Amino acid sequence: MDLRTVFIDMDRGADMALELFALATDDGLETAVILSLFSDARADDGDVLPLGQTDRRGWWGDAFPVAPGDRFGSRLWLLRASKQLQQSLNEAKQYAEEALAWMIKDGVARQVQVETFIPRNEVMGMIVRIYRPDGSVTPIRFETLWSAT
């Protein structure tokens, strides 16, 4: 069991969940997805940084990967100021799948499916479906990744 992490939004990030005045726990799957998606991976050399930024971010531990090419987090942060276009949805899907690929490689999931959508004007959302080796499917929905308000 892990401490349960809940995602709030891109501005406020994530926090530990409380249950009856104590920290809540879960099987770790949702927490693993939240940490994988909403921790900032280092931007690739060819990535365009958001306007006014020069920091390529990332986790220092990625400089010493256990397996070649391993890196922690996602590049979703690059889309923070993106316009509400299909291209932005496609990039968010790609970045999320990239960040969650370790789950398949490590045997946590048979398949990871990501769907991005626009639930309302100026808001991006995402549904992540984790297909477990036991045949179960865990959907995790994020309604407000980015919002102009």
Image (spheres, rainbow, N blue to C red):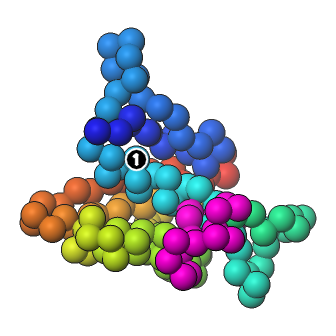
Residue at the image point whose x is 34% and y is 76% from the top: 105
Residues rendered magenta in the picture: 59-81
* Residue 2, image quadrant: top left
Q: Is residue 21 above or below residue 43?
A: above
Magenta-colored stretch includes residue 71: yes
Residues 113 and 143: in front is 113
Tell me if residue 143 is in the magenta stretch: no
Residue 136 visible somewhere in the drawing: yes
Relative to 133, does residue 122 appear above or below in the rendering? Answer: above
Mark 1, residue position = 31
In percent of width and height, residue 25 lies at 32, 32
The residue sitting at the top extreme is: 21
Relative image position of residue 122 (x, y in whole percent): 60, 58
Outermost residue toward the left in this view: 135
Using the image as rendered, state which of residue 64 and residue 121 is in the foreground. 64
Q: Quadrant of residue 52?
A: bottom right
The answer to whether residue 86 is seen in the rendering is no
Residue found 58% across the figure and 72% down from its top: 65
Q: Nearer the viewer, residue 16 or 91?
A: 16
- Estimate the x, y position of residue 147 in percent, counting from the top left: 61, 52
Q: State whether the magenta stretch is mostly helix, strand or loop.
A: loop
Tell me if residue 131 comes above or below residue 94 in the rendering.
Answer: above
